[in-house]
Image (cartoon, rainbow, N blue to C red):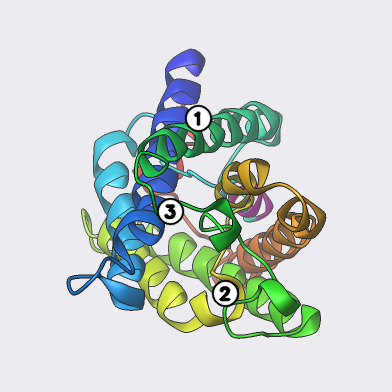
Amino acid sequence: MSLQKYAAEFIGTFWLTFAGCGSAVIAAGFPQVGIGLVGVSLAFGLSVITMAYAIGHVSGAHLNPAVTLGLAAGGRFPPGQIVPYVIAQVVGAVVASAVLYVIASGTAGFDLAKGFAANGYGAHSPGGYSLVAALVSEVVMTMMFLFVIMGATHGKAPAGFAPLAIGLALTLIHLVSIPVTNTSVNPARSTGPALFVGGWAIQQLWLFWVAPLIGGVLGGLLYRWLSPDSPAGIIEGNRS
């Protein structure tokens, strides 16, 4: 079953990165009918909702190293599976970025210098936000994301609604933090585009690993403290 779990994480993270970053690269600023910040936020949220329903029963639909680590910190995921989950997620994001690059570069106006949905701070923040602001934003947003995931997938939570709560939480996170960092809260999602942009995106990538991982652990620990009896629902992916 482990191979199927890793394949599911690869596919799910591919979809999140391709759909979310693709909406930003291809559709956000399209003349006259661009989807804008709200549309990109919804795209990321919808990618999680659709994959949570599709593969939640297979792998838990983490799609994010910070979620995997946070669930382990919260007692919902076996630590021994963290590394293969993260590898599958990162590879999925990189492959998605490669496919997106092939499609996006098919127009004469394509320019990697525009960012390719990479995350950044300072001069590479959409709103010019500082390193400290970016760090705080990513830690807090990821912490709250894990808090929602832990609560929505609690065994006593309303059955069948966890993907909606989680996807809508990710939408809210993007609505707030796209101007700050282009919104990461997901090291895999950040790694894919950064590898294609290179230069500054690679140099700043460390923040989009460190901050989400810290936030994920904090969110998992916070909910574990708040609800120590926390029975797991199906979406955590801790079934073997």
Where are the magenta residues, as a range?
69-73
Crowding at dot 3, Cα within 10 Å, few <14 / some 14-19 / many 20+, comes out as many
Furthest toward the front, the residue is: 108
- The label shown at residue 95 is 1
Of marks 2 and 3, the one in the foreground? 3
| Three-letter code for the amino acid on which mark 1 is drawn | Val
**Above-or-below relation of 151 to 196:** below
Q: Quadrant of residue 192?
A: top right
x 57%, y 29%: residue: 91
Question: Does 56 appear in magenta?
Answer: no
- The label shown at residue 181 is none
Residue nearest the viewer, comparing 141 with 42? 42
Q: Position of residue 158 (x, y in %)?
A: 24, 63
**Above-or-below relation of 227 to 196:** below
Q: Is residue 97 visible?
A: yes
Residue identifier under label 3: 21
Q: Position of residue 89 (x, y in %)?
A: 55, 35
Label 3, secondary structure: give it.
Answer: helix
* First-in-chain label (3 vs 1): 3
Residue nearest the viewer, comparing 15 with 226? 15
In the picture provided, is 49 more to the left or to the right than 218? left
| Three-letter code for the amino acid on which mark 3 is drawn | Cys
Quadrant containing the N terminus is top left
Residue identifier under label 2: 141
Distance (Cα) linking label 2 and label 3:
18 Å
- Which secondary structure dominates the residues rendered in magenta? helix
**Above-or-below relation of 163 to 180:** above
Q: Quadrant of residue 154?
A: bottom left
| Three-letter code for the amino acid on which mark 2 is drawn | Met
Crowding at dot 1, Cα within 10 Å, few <14 / some 14-19 / many 20+, comes out as some
